[in-house]
Image (cartoon, grey):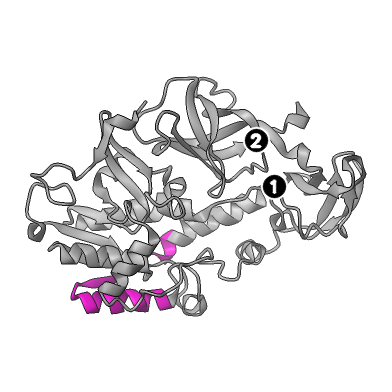
Amino acid sequence: MHTANSKMEATGDPLLNSLGFAKAPADTRVVVAMSGGVDSSVTAALLHDQGYEVIGITLQLYDHGVAVQAKGACCAGIDIHDARTVSASLGIPHYVLDYESSFHDQVMQDFADSYLRGETPIPCVRCNQTVKFTDLLATARELGADCLATGHYVQRLETDHGLALARGADPAKDQSYFMFATTAEQLSYLRFPLGGMSKDETRDLARRHGLAVSEKPDSQDICFVPNGRYGDVVRRLRPGAVDAGDIRHLDGTILGRHNGVIDYTIGQRRGLGIGGRKDADESEGPLYVVGIDADSNTVLVGPQAALACREVHLHDVNWINGQPEDGSRVLARLRNTAPAAPARIYCDRPELAPAIILLDEPQFGIAAGQAAALYDAEDADILLGGGWISKAPLLADK
């Protein structure tokens, strides 16, 4: 395990430039992934100011006609325009690459299939995993770049055990949860110049550089779901695959009907379609979605207490700097907005799952399809890796 005293910034060697290369910035080519937002724009501006040879690349990820109308979504049409504008103001080359086919096949299709399985996917992680840090990274290498820089709020650190990925310095903007699938090879090529900054500092730099996007709001929506209506996207991608079914209480009582399990997620309380019914056994407390059975097309509801679980099964597990010993203490972050919870990790039970998290205390509303990011118990900033949640058995079922 890493310790708090065993890490330093990856650029701490005075013989290296700020990106960690033993050559002048002018001799260092950097591709910057430019989304058109303030973070990636400031990343490009900072590196350009430091004398690096900067190339801006923006990805067109989905239908441009739709993208132009998708205000407030990442990688929308206006974002491509903004990235071009910023690049022109900095005097750096800028290219728009059509990754629509790759994004559709590897992110959007997975998104639809996951919802149809009764899961709650995180397409932004899948995009990092399959498009940005695979396809774009390969393109940067083809362009002869020494590294790929992004505007993520995470830190790339040197430790006694090699390179590590750590939380961003600003807790409110930390994006490490979305980076659990980053491999050691990818991390060696990636750079995150904003990792030690706060969002306020980033915006201040944007103003000082006169960037047109300095006051641009952060994107809030998934890029291909600009109105937040996930079910509409799944129905469009999988016509005829969504069927109505029962909403059933844990006691077996059928409370109503739903129009598709894709409209529900574990822990959901509002919009259940059962007229605001409460649970008589829980002092008239509200009902929550406690299970989704895609095979029987059933949504299960019950009291909040029924959501408790201590065991979380993972698949497609990634360890950034080596698999920890079985039974090691970790901190498990099971949702981006949730605090990391003390736990142990087990990887010696392949008949059950590639990895199993055993939480010290029960957690509530853990959904299959979400990510589990695992941090060092001795140094909570260090991201060890993580995996996709395949199962979270409820305590009530045991």
Q: Name the foreground residue: 256 vs 107.
A: 256
Three-letter code, disc 1: Ile
Looking at the image, residue 99 sits to the left or right of residue 367; the answer is left
Residue 97 seen in the figure: no
Above/below status of 287 relative to 350: below
Secondary structure of the residue carrying numbered label 2: loop
Pointer 1 residue? 266
- Residue 163 placement: quadrant: top left
Mark 2 nearby-residue class (10 Å; few <14, some 14–19, many ≥20) = many
Residue 247: mark in rendering: none
**Relative image position of residue 117 (x, y in whole percent):** 66, 47
Q: Earlier in the sequence, mark 1 or mark 2?
A: 1
For the residue pair 181 and 305, the one nearer the viewer reads as 305
Residue 171 lies, with reference to residue 58, above or below; the image says above
Numbered range of the magenta stretch: 78-102
Could you say where residue 3 lies in the image, as x and y percent from the top left? 34, 28
Residue 392: which numbered mark, if any?
2
Magenta region includes residue 238: no
> Is residue 190 left or right of 64 when viewed as pictured?
left
Q: Main secondary structure of the magenta part?
A: helix
Q: Amino acid at mark 2?
A: Ala
Q: Percent position (x, y) of residue 332?
A: 52, 35
- Crowd rating for badge 1 (residues with CA inside 10 Å; few <14, some 14–19, many 20+): many
Q: Quadrant of residue 94?
A: bottom left
Mark 1 and mark 2 in contact? Answer it, CB < 8 Å. yes
Q: Quadrant of the C terminus?
A: top right
Q: Position of residue 319 (x, y in %)?
A: 40, 34
Say which residue appears at 55% left-offset and 21% top-offset: 349
- Residue at the image point whose x is 44% and y is 50% from the top: 171
Residue 56 visible (yes or no): yes
Q: Secondary structure at mark 1?
A: loop
